[in-house]
Image (tube, rainbow, N blue to C red):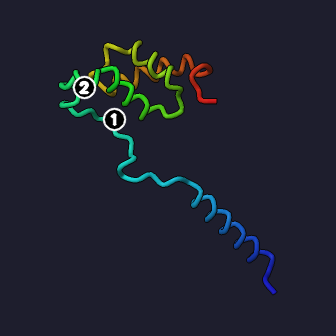
Amino acid sequence: MFSRSFLVFFGMVALFTLAVAAVPVIDDEEEISLEIDMNELDDVESKSLLAIALKVLSAAFKWAVKHCLKEAAQNCKQHWKHPKALISCAKHFLESNKGRCALG
């Protein structure tokens, strides 16, 4: 009825469609934003700089365990007000501790 090549092609298209459907879709609201609002930095009473640093690091390194992110934030304390430098510093820390910090 159908040729073998048509059935193989149809099967590949079906597998591709399933693979695309299985990938989670990220909404605009869920996009990673590494920018910090300066009002957030001025309002130290409600949110400490450590909490803001943890927010930035958890957005950048979703695969890392929370206690490792806290440790990375503490080690990179001098970069808390500069998100790009903070992420770079934390990246080096997490690379050296990847076996201990990866989610299992």
Quadrant location of the C terminus in the rendered image: top right
Quadrant location of the N terminus in the rendered image: bottom right
Q: Residue at x 37, y 30 (%)?
A: 55
Going from N to C along the chain, the mark reached first, 1 or 2, is: 1
Q: Residues within 10 Å of mark 1 (few under 14, many from 20)?
A: some
Which x, y percent locates residue 103? 59, 29
**Residue 27 versus residue 88: which sits nearer the camera?**
27
Q: Residue at x 31, y 18 (%)?
A: 79
Which x, y percent locates residue 84? 33, 27
Marks counted in the figure total 2
**Residue 68 versus residue 2: which sits nearer the camera?**
68
Q: Residue at x 25, y 25 (%)?
A: 46
Q: Amino acid at mark 2?
A: Ser
Q: Residue at x 68, y 63 (%)?
A: 15
Q: Residues within 10 Å of mark 2 (few under 14, many from 20)?
A: few
Q: Residue furthest front?
A: 46
Which x, y percent locates residue 64? 52, 28
Which x, y percent locates residue 10? 70, 73
Q: Quadrant of residue 14?
A: bottom right
Q: Is residue 51 left or right of residue 12?
A: left
Residue at numbered disc 2: 46
Q: Quadrant of residue 53?
A: top left
Foreground: disc 1 or disc 2: 2
Position above or below: 102 against 23: above
Residue 42's disc number: none
Position above or below: 78 against 15: above
Q: Secondary structure at mark 2?
A: loop
Q: Secondary structure at mark 1?
A: loop
Residue at numbered disc 1: 34
Alpha carbons under labels 1 and 2: distance apart = 20 Å
Q: Amino acid at mark 1?
A: Leu
Q: Is residue 7 left or right of residue 44?
A: right
